[in-house]
Image (cartoon, rainbow, N blue to C red):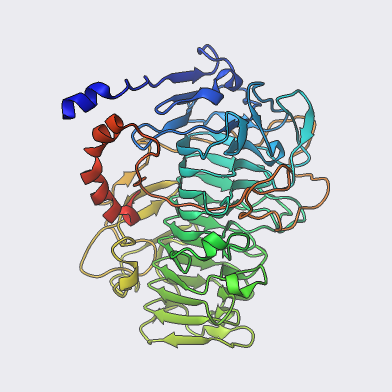
Amino acid sequence: MLSSLFAAAPPLARAEVFEVGDGMSYAAIGDVPWESLMPGDTVRIHWRAAPYNEKWVIGRRGTEAAPITIQGVAGPGGERPVIDGRGATTRAELDFRNEVRGVIKVGSSNRPEDTLPGYIIIEGLEIRSGRAPFNFTNPDGSSATYSDNAAAIYVEKAEFLTIRNCALHDSGNGLFIGSFDGETHDILVESNSLYDNGISGSAYQHNSYTAAIDITFQFNHYGPLRDGCDGNNLKDRSAGLVVRHNWVESGNRQLDLVDAEDSAVLVGHPSYGETFVYGNVLVEHEGDGNSQIIHYGGDSGTEGDYRKGTLHLFNNTIVSTRSGNTTLLRLSTNEESADVRNNVVYVTASGDRLAMLSENGDLTLMHNWMKPGRSDSHGTLSGSITDDGSGVSGAAPGFVDEAGQDYHLALGSSCIDAAATLNAAVLPDHDLSEMYVRHQAREARPVDSTLDIGAFEYCAPGMCTTVRPDGGTPGLDSGTPGPDGSVPGVDSGTGSPDGSTPGADGGSTGTDDGGCGCRVVVASSPERGRSWGAIVVFGVLALFRVGRRARRGRRS
């Protein structure tokens, strides 16, 4: 019976590799047949001295075993290939809506025929300059201007999508992911550099702005936004959100984790009420805008849609160099709670300049390091704070090199072996197994009898091994965008409001955001539409999939 099924199974199409660049089989990105990519196909875009002024849509599906990969091939000095949105052209065979919303778009196309793109990997590219006032050319030859809320990568809808080791900058949003009312799910954003995005004078564009079901951010480096831009660094409206082992520096807020304002599917999802933030370095500088480090709950004004759950904030290293007040958390209502344990929360100002809450919320504190004298609130506290008295304090936490931003613990630090056990609610999926390495790399977290406070476990020199996702080093950015008649940093007009937020179901206009929704980790559901023969072939993988499902929270 088994042999007859294998005999009846259609032959698997041979995956193709498309080499793009100077002297390659395909001189331009637009020469690649994007409308007909098949599972297992790889598009390799080679670095060259000149940027690729091209834009396109990804509207095809891979499989778990054979994803479609768009891969940058680094230059001799590790430089990523540059995709520049200014003056960009698009292959005539492609046809898709919302061209004004991004340089690389994923999902919602007319040609190729519309589907839910899935099992896609985008890695190793520098993508820049998708914003007003820059122009591009549509597939029909007409000229258009990017919208204020355009993005370097704009995901209207997708599932099982990985964005890895890319540099996203000089755009309205560096990364925008829409939920498409719950269709977008299982998203991994890993080892990227996101910086220098935003629209001058606007608070509505961010380094990343996302909404999905099950999305994980890990090992990313978030830097400052463009000068004069008031957006947040990482803004999210997802269900099933994990933010771990990232470096997030500057922004109006470092993390803005608010409600899925346009998607009842996300609001009703079982994972909507729990958010996991751990192993991160969060840095607030003097003059960074809002004095709150993290906002959790909602901002739409429809309080019934707010997260109404628990923020698990543990083993982070949080540093503020503000001379004035710093507030750790803004919890939107008293129905939002936070379990805050094992964090270094260090202000360079006096200890009384640090407050725990803005006003509302239910906060539990355990085994955190802070300077003496911290406040409950710089205003009027209407929420509640439970502190079990296990915190550690001192003049400084004992960093290896505070001025050089080496926030590892030095020998003798009071944070060593001073942490509490993790909350049972975060285990086993969110155990501490890795640490961030500057920048966009990782290493194993040493294990001993007692955890240390903060993002970094004390490690004797030479005892920790750095691991990079691609086995090499993150690509280098090419620096400032080249001249094109427009000066980067100067905008015409003001940003659009957050009404163009993740969550809508897509439309025909450039102001539509496509919605939001996602999840990281390994794809665990079988590919829809497989033949019986293929099901038998891939059924052998089921045992491995069960094990991986159990470990999905620790996937890296």
State the residue at coordinates (38%, 81%). 391
Residue 533 vs 540, above or below: the answer is above
Query: Is residue 159 toward the left or the right of residue 507 in the image?
Result: left
Q: Which of 57 and 72 is in front in this view?
A: 57
Q: Is residue 479 visible?
A: no
Q: Nearer the viewer, residue 379 or 214?
A: 214
Residue 225 vs 153, above or below: the answer is below
Expressed as whole percent of the image width and height from the top left, the position of residue 449 reads 20, 68
Q: Nearer the viewer, residue 87 or 289?
A: 87
State the residue at coordinates (46%, 48%). 187
Specify the quadrant that holds the N terminus.
Answer: top left
Expressed as whole percent of the image width and height from the top left, the position of residue 291 reads 63, 70
State the residue at coordinates (64%, 85%). 379
Q: Is residue 484 visible?
A: yes
State the residue at coordinates (17%, 25%). 3
Residue 302, quarter of the rendered image: bottom right
Residue 287, quarter of the rendered image: bottom right
Residue 235, quarter of the rendered image: bottom right
Query: Is residue 222 toward the left or the right of residue 426 in the image?
Result: right
Query: Is residue 464 toward the left or the right of residue 186 in the image?
Result: left
Expressed as whole percent of the image width and height from the top left, the position of residue 428 reads 28, 63
Total marks in image: 0
Expressed as whole percent of the image width and height from the top left, the position of residue 338 reads 46, 75
Residue 31 vs 507, above or below: the answer is above
Q: Which of 23 and 9 is in front in this view?
A: 9
